[in-house]
Amino acid sequence: MTTPSPTAKFLGYAGLIPFMALSAFLLLLPSSPHKEIAFLSLLAYGATIVSFLGAIHWGFVMQQVAPDRLLLLWGIAPSLLGWMSLLIGSSNGLLLLTATLCLCFLIDYRTYPKFGLVQWLSMRFILTVVASMSLALTAIFV
């Protein structure tokens, strides 16, 4: 699948709902008694998503005759950064996730063309921008 199918697009964009909803909740209701669980939910969801983005690279390696060790290493880096963001918590954890999402996109921008997946990059860019903005705005203003 060299271009995102309608289902992939639907699921990708639907994956932004937790980012936007939790961020909006925290920004609009900063004194809510549910603030802590919403904040932790946003952190955990972000960590889950960056882990998914890293795992894609293992899928690439599984298609290769001679495994690319750098892709394998990169494949685990987002998971470790996501885990660190949970340990850090607070706004700094959200900022680490923001940076990780941006780094994932930069790596993907260089990697996807090698696998004939250039057509996925425009969707990935939009997903990265919206998710990153949700995390960053929450980190800065909550």
Image (tube, helix red, strand yellow):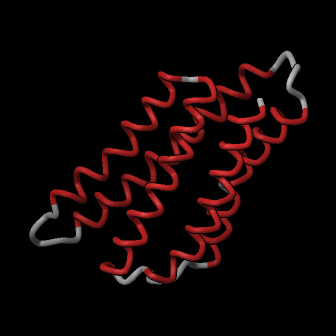
Instruction: Name which quarter of the figure residue 61 lies in.
Output: bottom left
**Residue 4 drawn at (x, y percent):** 55, 78
Residue located at (40% from left, 45% from top)? 78
Q: Is residue 92 above or below residue 24?
A: above
Position of the C terminus, as image quadrant, is top right
Residue located at (68% from left, 68% from top)? 10
| Apparent side of residue 101 relative to residue 15 in the rendered image (left or right) | left
| Apparent side of residue 17 relative to residue 100 in the rendered image (left or right) | right
The residue positioned farthest toward the top in the image shown: 33
| Apparent side of residue 66 relative to residue 131 in the rendered image (left or right) | left
Residue located at (46% from left, 37% from top)? 82
**Residue 129 drawn at (x, y percent):** 64, 60
Seen from the viewer's position, the closer of residues 3 and 131 is 131
Instruction: Name which quarter of the figure residue 138 lies in.
Output: top right
Instruction: Name which quarter of the figure residue 30 lies in.
Output: top right
State the count of labels.
0
**Residue 110 drawn at (x, y percent):** 36, 72
Q: Is residue 98 above or below residue 119?
A: above
Position of the N terminus, as image quadrant, is bottom left
| Apparent side of residue 90 relative to residue 138 in the rendered image (left or right) | left
Q: Is residue 110 above or below residue 135?
A: below
The residue positioned farthest toward the left in the image shown: 66
The residue positioned farthest toward the front in the image shown: 140
**Residue 89 drawn at (x, y percent):** 56, 23
Residue located at (62% from left, 62% from top)? 127
Seen from the viewer's position, the closer of residues 125 and 54 is 125
